[in-house]
Image (spheres, helix red, strand yellow):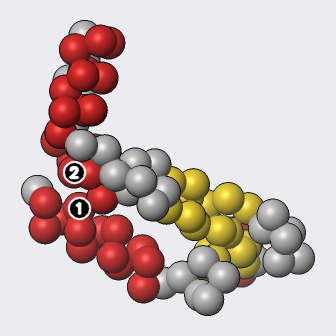
Amino acid sequence: MTNFVHKTVNGLKSLLDEKGAIKLFCSEGDTMECLVTFSPDKATLNEIQSFEAKHQITLPEDYQKFITLHNGAKIFDILSDGEN
């Protein structure tokens, strides 16, 4: 699972330009520029377990792996004329 999450995150990062933006193809040949930012913070196993205990839930394994890399992200934040 860890390898899958790493490959997915790194694959997305490899598609970003120097601004952290990606161009998406939309309907009828239109394109849309979107910003992708990853939190520099990382969740610890203890933080994850505390959160799960407090909320009486179990987070999916792949999501747990993701938040140990980046504790959050804004993905596909729409840019208009290069501005957020």
Which residue was labeled with disc 2? 65
Q: In the rendered view, would you say 74 is above or below 46?
A: below
Q: In the rendered view, would you say 18 is above or below 79?
A: below
Using residue 28 as the reference point, say whether residue 35 is left or right of it. left
Q: Nearer the viewer, residue 13 or 23?
A: 13
Look at label 2 and name its amino acid: Lys
Identified at 48% across, 84% down, the residue is 15
Q: CA distance from mark 2 to mark 1?
A: 7 Å
Tell me the number on the disc at residue 5: 1
* Quadrant of the rendering where the C terminus is positioned: bottom right
| Within-10-Å neighbours for mark 1: few <14, some 14–19, many 20+ | some
Identified at 73% across, 62% down, the residue is 78
Task: Name the image quarter holding residue 16.
Answer: bottom right
Secondary structure category for the residue under label 1: helix
Look at label 1 and name its amino acid: Val
Q: Nearer the viewer, residue 32 or 59?
A: 59
Identified at 61% across, 61% down, the residue is 76
Q: Nearer the viewer, residue 81 or 20?
A: 20
Horizontal and vertical percent position of residue 60: 21, 36
Q: In the rendered view, would you say 75 is above or below 36?
A: above
